[in-house]
Every structure is written in C-alpha cells, then in structure tokens.
Image: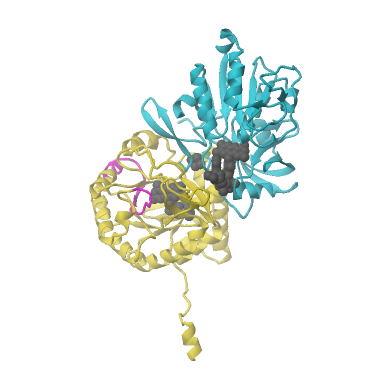
Chain colours: A yellow, B cyan
C-alpha cells in the first residue's frame, strides 16, 4: 500500500481512503472470491444494511442496468443483528481492514437497540442508514426529516461510544441542514450520498422492471449530484471537523480525487466493483500518483481544497 | 476460519476467436482462456463485459470447453441491449470475463442422467454431456427449441426413433451420447411437442431398475423448468435445475439475483450467482 494514502477517519487508522460501500460487498468476504481482490487494498468495508430481526428483502427482479448506472431494490435482506454479531463477524479477518456495520431500524427505539448491540461487539464503527429508499418503514422516512434524523442519531449516540457515521439521503430539499442536525446530535462522520430514487419500465409488459416498482439509482449517472451534495455538506461539516465518506458514482481515481477536493476525507466504491472487481488498487495508485504529482504529502492536504469560481451570472457579464 | 471460497473466481481478458450467427438471433462465440477452459464445471457461468458502452456485465453459461486449445464456447440469444452489444463483438476483440462462477451441477451415483435443455438453456446440458462422455454414465439428452436449432441436426447413428425424434446434435453424436430434439415447430427429425412429453416417452421405455437410476438435470425458461420439476416429481426422480435472474456483482455481494427457496427453516432468499445457479427442484417449485 502507498504510504501517502494512510489516513485517519473518525479516529480509525485507514491504510487507504477507499471505503467499500454497504450493500455492494455483502458481509465483507464476498469479493475475496475474486483472485487479485484483497480486503487489504481498502481502508474500510461497510457491511450490508442490518436490521434487528432477519429480513428476506424484496421480490425479484432486484437490479437492472440504466444509462451509466443501475437501479436496485434489495430491501435490506439480512440475517438480523444477532446472527451478524455472533456468526458473521467472528469470521472476518480484522487484520485486513476496518469493518463498519450499516444499521437500519423501523423505529427510533430500534435504531437505538441495534446500536447498543453492536456497541458490545468488536465492530470498528457504526453507520446509521437513514436513507434507504427501498423499505416501507424507516430508512429514508427518517432521513428526509431533519428532526427525525436528529432523534435517530441522538439515541444511537447515547447507546454507543463507537465512531458513528450518518448516511444522508440525496432525496431531500436541504441536505446541509440535515447534516447540521446530525452533527448536533453527535455524529462523528457523514456518508454522502445514498442512492437517488428512480424507476425503469419494461415497454413490452408496461410494468416496472424492478419487483419493488422503484429503487435506488447508483453508478456514474449520479456522480454530479453526489459531488454537489458533498460540497454542500462540507460547508457545514468542516466547521466541526466532521469527516465525510464521499460516494455516488465513483469509477476512477479521478472521480475519487474530485470528491476529496469537494470535501470528502474518504471515498466510497460500490457500483464500480460490479464492472471491475479489481478497480480498488487502480484507484489507490491513481490517488497516490496525483498526490505526488501535486507535491501533497497526504490526502489531508487535498481535502476540501476546491477553489470556487467567482459566480458572476451571464446577465452580470452582459451588463458590463 | 475457512477461506476456501477465496480466489476461486478469476478476472480474465479473453480474445474472440470465432463468432457465428444462427437463425432466431442466436450466436455461438468462442473465447480464448486457459483458466476458464480448465477450471469450469458443468453448470457454471461467466460474467462478461459486452462493451464499453454498457458497463454492467451479463451472465452466460459455459457451453463447452476445449482444454487443449484453451478455449470455451458460449451460446446466447439476443434479447436486449446487452446481448445485442455482445453480438457486435468481432473476431480479435478482447472481452473482460469473470469466471467460472456458481456451484454447477452435482453428478450423483445415479447412472442415467436425463438432461433437458430448452432454448438458451441448452448450454449447461451440453457441458454436462461433454464432462461425462467417457464415463460409466448412460445419459439421455433432450434439447428443445422453438427457433431453428443453432447447429446442423443429424440423424442419430443408433437409429432409434422416439415417436418421430430421430435427429441429434452433432457434438452428442461425437461424444457417443444419446440425444433427441423436441419442438412445437415442424423441424425435421424433431419430436413434435414439449421436451417433457419426449421425456415421458423416454422414461416410459425404461425398466423399473433403469428408472431408479435416473436423475434429471435441466436448464431453460421458467415455465419449462416448472414442467420438468413436475414431471420429476411424478416419476419420483431427483431433479437439479439451473435458474436465471438479473445479476449485478455475480460474486454474492449485492443480493440482487435471489430466488425464493424452501429450506428446513422456512423460506429463504438464495443468490443465484453463488448459492446457485443450480438448485434442487423441490426447493424452488
Ligand atoms: C447463470 C445464468 C446463465 C445464463 N446463461 C445464458 C446462456 O447460456 N445463453 C443466453 O442466451 N442467456 C443466458 N442467460 C441469460 C442472459 O444473462 C440474459 O439474457 C441477458 O443478461 C440479457 O441481457 P440484455 O441486456 O440483452 O437484456 P435486457 O435488456 O437486460 O433484458 C431483455 C429481456 O431479458 C430479460 N432478462 C434480462 N436478464 C435476464 C436474465 N439474467 N435471465 C433471464 N432473462 C433476463 C429481461 O427481463 C427482459 O425481458 C443466463 C443468465 C444467468 C443468470
Ligand atoms: C445493490 C446495492 C445495495 C445497496 N444496499 C445498501 C444498504 O444496505 N445500505 C446502505 O446504506 N446503502 C446501500 N446501497 C447504497 C450504496 O452503499 C451507495 O451509497 C450507493 O450505491 C452510491 O454509491 P455507488 O454509486 O458507488 O454505488 C446499496 C447500493 C447498491 C447498488
Ligand atoms: S449478482 Fe450480486 S449477489 Fe448475485
């Protein structure tokens, strides 16, 4: 691993700024099936969204390709908190990388209960998913309302001393306000963004392609949206030194660098793995080389270094 | 902890060596890869990049392998954008392939495998046949299609006529494996009817002792598999079916490809890519 990629995130020492995203890499071991893929190439892995009780998830079809992206509606299929803690986590090799659990509750109390159970485990951090678009209860219902978001983060904060990351939804009017409330409630980090809601229709059958009718759009198609959201959230989070996992359509090292410049401390890789399972070392190499080329010692020197254009509108130019 | 699953799937760049078009928008593509040719078991598939314009891979079963020349063949039908893009790939182009993936079929001690393949579900049946051609198995294969078969059907050399089914696929003939064709269309030498009807004709011709040695292996469209599973149940035969679902990762990471399976602990959602694609028919139908 390149030395200049080592970084700190919410108190965790990471060997790389890459974080593998929840729902794309199962419970941490799935991608190791691929020869040449290694968990040691990434700073951290977010495990699949986990609920208190087991969930079977949504009916098929659950995934479909869309222009420069895909829609998914998995519906948080997972074996439940206790099985994750007792049967899955013991099999993870903690020497290889850091592991973050991604949690979802159907009520505020349930979020609190799950956070408490993971607090007693040896998970490295907890990511609160208040932005899942694919479940009826909870998820995005909490994430679109800053006061509800506050209460979810607050109860988790009470119940754990582990680093807490809150994953924000792009499907809301004012993401910066929501970020502010989550910081007020004690989140240590923010994940920006979860998927955008979308639909795909089969014109032969005149039905939605996805069993759940709608789903979450990810991949390159959402990158410009995600980048702006990271920029907006960073305007708030930088005041409190709350770091961001920037994510949404990162495919290349250059994409990752854009997110870091916009204010992300770490970068999430999800959909890109489906196209190229060996993409992580390439992104590491690219970021490391960029730092060298620009005489920067570490990622820290690049975070949030965006220089905005002086925003004169066309109309202003015309009047001069 | 056991890490047996690690490094079992390879990412390989494969050159297109041949690419033939058949009637009914069907294609057979030959790709070069030592690893896929040597490591693939019948029923396993590859996840293939069809073009730069369409980054999501498409899953296709491996039909046959040539270990000596380090190549493998896929048979596919154009049904949408992805398979359309694949059909446009020219000889000499290089495609990224992930594989081999999946559990594949399990050959049991039942010595009379009955292979039933429909449409682009034929490839896994061809793969099984190739893998047991020089063994003590006595397989019988039934291939069904409603578009012209993607090969030149020929008269089977053993001359047996199963109610009009006299023709076979040339490869099966080379491998000395009995095979017949079925279709609702009037194709020369094909049984006129469903694959399951021809299967009945075959099964009814077996002695009780022979019948006890039959295990059914099948791949094809969902309604066909359902009918095959029903038939197997009627005749009290074990039956393995290979299923399809839309896929994203194909390594078990996204839970995008699941089917509902009955287990001892009630219904479960199993991933077609790594828990399958082959399942015990009684658990899915
Ligand atoms: C394990 C496995 C093995 C397969 N083996 C073969 C094979 O040997 N030969 C072959 O021709 N096809 C095979 N398929 C099916 C093949 O993957 C799909 O036909 C292909 O992905 C369709 O992509 P598309 O972009 O052309 O079509 P799309 O535009 O995605 O879809 C067109 C139509 O096909 C349907 N479809 C899409 N994906 C699938 C799918 N995975 N299975 C069934 N229907 C689908 C859609 O619902 C739609 O109606 C296999 C699928 C799996 C899961
Ligand atoms: C198949 C799939 C499943 C996902 N499941 C979850 C989940 O369980 N919890 C969650 O917080 N985000 C989930 N996500 C969202 C991703 O973690 C990520 O935020 C999003 O896909 C954007 O990044 P990308 O464009 O790099 O994929 C899922 C995404 C995909 C594609
Ligand atoms: S395609 Fe991702 S789990 Fe099967």
x, y (%) of residue A26? 44, 42
Q: Residue at x 48, y 48 (%)?
A: A209
Q: Quadrant of residue B156?
A: top right
Q: Residue at x 38, y 52 (%)?
A: A133
x, y (%) of residue B265? 36, 27
Q: Is A131 covered by the magenta stretch?
A: yes
Judge whether residue A17 can be spotted in this image.
no
Q: Which residues are magenta?
A: A116-135
Q: Residue furthest bottom?
A: A320
From the viewer's side, name the closer residue of B280 and A163.
B280
- Residue B36 as seen in the image, left or right of residue A44: right
- Residue B41 as seen in the image, left or right of residue B234: right
From the viewer's side, name the closer residue of A236 and A293.
A236
x, y (%) of residue B191? 66, 25
Q: In the rendered view, would you say B246 is above or below A170?
A: above
- Residue B77 as seen in the image, left or right of residue A248: right
From the viewer's side, name the closer residue of A295 and B285.
B285
Q: Is B251 covered by the magenta stretch?
A: no
From the viewer's side, name the closer residue of A187 and A215.
A215
x, y (%) of residue B202? 62, 17
Q: Quadrant of residue B213?
A: top right
Judge whether residue A159 can be spotted in this image.
yes
Q: In the rendered view, would you say A280 is above or below B240?
A: below
Q: Quadrant of ligand 1?
A: top right
- Residue A291 as seen in the image, left or right of residue B63: left
Quarter containing the N terminus of chain B: top left
């Amino acid at each position: 691993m390149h030395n200049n990629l080592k970084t700190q995130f919410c108190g965790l020492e990471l060997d790389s700024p890459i974080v593998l995203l929840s729902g794309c890499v199962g419970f941490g071991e799935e991608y190791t099936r691929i020869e040449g893929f290694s968990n040691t190439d990434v700073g951290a892995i977010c495990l699949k969204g986990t609920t208190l009780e087991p969930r079977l998830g949504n009916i098929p079809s659950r995934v479909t390709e869309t222009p420069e992206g895909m829609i998914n509606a998995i519906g948080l299929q997972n074996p439940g908190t206790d099985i994750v803690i007792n049967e899955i986590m013991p099999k993870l090799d903690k020497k290889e990388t850091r592991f973050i659990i991604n949690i979802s509750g159907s009520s505020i109390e349930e979020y609190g209960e799950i956070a408490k159970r993971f607090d007693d485990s040896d998970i490295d951090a907890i990511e609160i998913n208040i932005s899942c678009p694919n479940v009826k209860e909870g998820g995005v219902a909490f994430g679109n309302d800053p006061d509800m978001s506050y209460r979810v983060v607050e109860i988790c904060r009470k119940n754990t001393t582990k680093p807490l990351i809150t994953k924000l939804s792009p499907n809301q009017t004012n993401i910066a306000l929501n970020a502010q409330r989550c910081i007020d409630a004690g989140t240590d980090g923010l994940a920006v963004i979860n998927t955008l809601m979308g639909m795909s229709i089969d014109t032969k059958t005149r039905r939605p392609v996805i069993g759940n009718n709608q789903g979450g759009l990810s991949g390159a198609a959402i990158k410009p949206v995600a980048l702006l959201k990271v920029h907006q959230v960073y305007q708030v989070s930088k005041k409190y030194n709350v770091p961001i996992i920037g994510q949404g359509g990162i495919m290349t090292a250059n994409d990752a660098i854009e997110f870091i410049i916009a204010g992300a401390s770490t970068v999430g890789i999800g959909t890109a793995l489906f196209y190229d399972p060996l993409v992580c070392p390439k992104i590491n190499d690219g970021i490391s080389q960029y730092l060298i080329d620009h005489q920067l010692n570490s990622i820290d020197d690049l975070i949030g270094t965006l220089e905005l254009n002086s925003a004169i509108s066309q109309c202003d130019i015309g009047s001069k | 902890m056991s890490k047996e699953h690690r490094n079992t799937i390879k990412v390989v760049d494969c050159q297109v060596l041949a690419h033939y078009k058949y009637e009914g928008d069907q294609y057979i593509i030959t790709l070069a890869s030592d690893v896929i040719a040597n490591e693939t078991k019948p029923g396993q598939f590859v996840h293939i990049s069809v073009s730069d314009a369409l980054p999501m891979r498409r899953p296709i079963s491996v039909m046959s392998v040539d270990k000596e020349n380090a190549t493998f063949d896929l048979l596919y039908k154009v049904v949408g954008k992805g398979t359309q893009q694949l059909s446009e790939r020219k000889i000499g182009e290089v495609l990224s392939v992930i594989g081999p993936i999946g559990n594949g079929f399990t050959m049991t001690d039942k010595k009379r495998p009955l292979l039933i393949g429909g449409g682009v579900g034929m490839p896994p049946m061809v793969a099984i046949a190739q893998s047991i051609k020089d063994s003590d198995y006595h397989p019988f294969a039934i291939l069904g299609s409603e578009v012209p078969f993607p090969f030149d059907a020929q008269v089977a050399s053993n001359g047996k006529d199963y109610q009009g089914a006299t023709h076979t696929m040339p490869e099966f003939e080379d491998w000395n494996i009995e095979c017949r064709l079925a279709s609702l269309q009037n194709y020369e030498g094909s049984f006129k009817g469903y694959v399951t009807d021809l299967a009945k004709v075959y099964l009814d011709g077996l002695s009780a002792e022979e019948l006890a040695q039959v295990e059914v292996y099948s791949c094809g469209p969902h309604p066909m598999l359902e009918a095959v599973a029903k038939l197997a149940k009627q005749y009290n035969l074990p039956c393995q079916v290979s299923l399809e679902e839309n896929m994203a990762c194909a390594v078990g990471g996204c839970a995008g490809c699941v089917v509902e399976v009955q287990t001892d602990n009630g219904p479960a959602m199993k991933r077609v890519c790594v828990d399958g694609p082959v399942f015990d028919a009684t658990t899915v139908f």
